[in-house]
Every structure is written in structure tokens, then in C-alpha cells.
Image (cartoon, grey):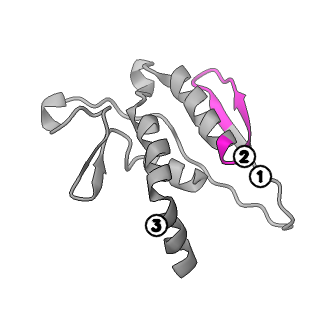
């Protein structure tokens, strides 16, 4: 695990530079707000990480599918979602939910914990 933590520390600024725009992009599925733009951004993040990516249209919102070929005979499936719940009530937020802000070492933004942050961690 030591090597993992070293890698994270060495690349922290890059990770934040990539994550923050992803968090700033609204993607409210129930309101159909920002989904297309977030799909494009997610596809770009995945491709920049070396993931072969395809956007699959569905009756609902698009699925962003990625695949990395490896030498192992095993398959690892990672699932995440890029849509978020509506941020209302807005008065409960100390800052704009789509303008990520770091306070006390934590990122505050809609989707930072569920699920854009975790999804980005898998990509990174």
C-alpha cells in the first residue's frame, strides 16, 4: 500500500485538476440537466487514462462503457454512475453545489462522495 499512497501524493494536483471540472459539471438525471455534457467529459477522462471507451445510447441516459485489455485471464468489473441527485434545498449548502470547494481537507460538491468522486478514483 505504501507505493499506492506515494503515487497518490505524487499525483495529487493532477488528480484534483481532473476531478474538479467533473464535479462542477451538473448531471442531474431526474431533471435531465447536463447529462450529455457530463457523458462527454467522462468519456474524455477515461480516454485520457488509457481506457478504450464507448458511449452507448439507451432509452434513458447514455452508458459510458470502458475496457482495458490485460494479460490476466480474470475480469474485473467496476460500476459507477455519473448522475447526481438534485442539490435542493440549496440553502443547506455552504457553497454552490456545482462549484467544488475544498474545506478542511474535504471536497464539497454535489457528487463528490456519491458517486463522481468514487468513479473518478477508479479511473485514476
Residue shown at 55% from the left, 46% from the top = 80
Which disc, if any, is residue 51? 2
Name the residue tied to disc 3: 9
Query: Mark 1 and 3 residues: CB-CB less than 8 Å, in contact?
Result: no
Quadrant in which residue 4 is drawn:
bottom right
Q: Nearer the viewer, residue 100 or 115?
A: 100
Mark closest to the chain's N terminus, 1 or 3? 3
Question: Residue 53 appears in which quarter of the rendering?
Answer: top right
Is disc 2 in contact with disc 1, using a CB cutoff of under 8 Å?
yes
Range drawn in magenta: 48-64
Q: Position of residue 105 (x, y in %)?
A: 27, 59
Sequence-wise, the earlier of marks 2 and 1 is: 2
Measuring from the top left, give residue 62's x and y in whole percent: 62, 27
Residue 20 seen: yes
The secondary element bearing badge 2 is classed as loop
Q: Quadrant of the C terminus?
A: bottom right
Name the foreground residue: 3 vs 96. 3
The residue to which callout 1 is attached is 68
Residue under the image location 46 percent in, 37 percent down: 22
Q: Does 57 lie within the magenta span?
A: yes
Instruction: Find out whether the residues at labels 2 and 3 contact each other: C-beta distance under 8 Å.
Output: no
Q: What kind of element bears circle 1?
A: loop
User: Marks 2 and 3, how far apart in space?
Assistant: 23 Å
The x and y percentages for residue 111 are: 38, 41
Image position, residue 37 (x, y; %)? 53, 22
Residue 113 lies left or right of residue 69; in this view the side is left
SS of the residue at dot 3?
A: helix
**Cα–Cα span, label 1 and label 3:** 24 Å
Amino acid at each position: 500500500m505504501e507505493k499506492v499512497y506515494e503515487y497518490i501524493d505524487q499525483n495529487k494536483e493532477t488528480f484534483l485538476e481532473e476531478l474538479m471540472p467533473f464535479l462542477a459539471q451538473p448531471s442531474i438525471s431526474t431533471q435531465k440537466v447536463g447529462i450529455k455534457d457530463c457523458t462527454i467529459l467522462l468519456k474524455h477522462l477515461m480516454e485520457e487514462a488509457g481506457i478504450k471507451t464507448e458511449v452507448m445510447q439507451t432509452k434513458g441516459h447514455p452508458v459510458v462503457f470502458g475496457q482495458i485489455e490485460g494479460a490476466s485471464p480474470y475480469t474485473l468489473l467496476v460500476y459507477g454512475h455519473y448522475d447526481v441527485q438534485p442539490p435542493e434545498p440549496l440553502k443547506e449548502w455552504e457553497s454552490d453545489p456545482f462549484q467544488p470547494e475544498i474545506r478542511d481537507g474535504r471536497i464539497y460538491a454535489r457528487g463528490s462522495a456519491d458517486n463522481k468522486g468514487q468513479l473518478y478514483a477508479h479511473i485514476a
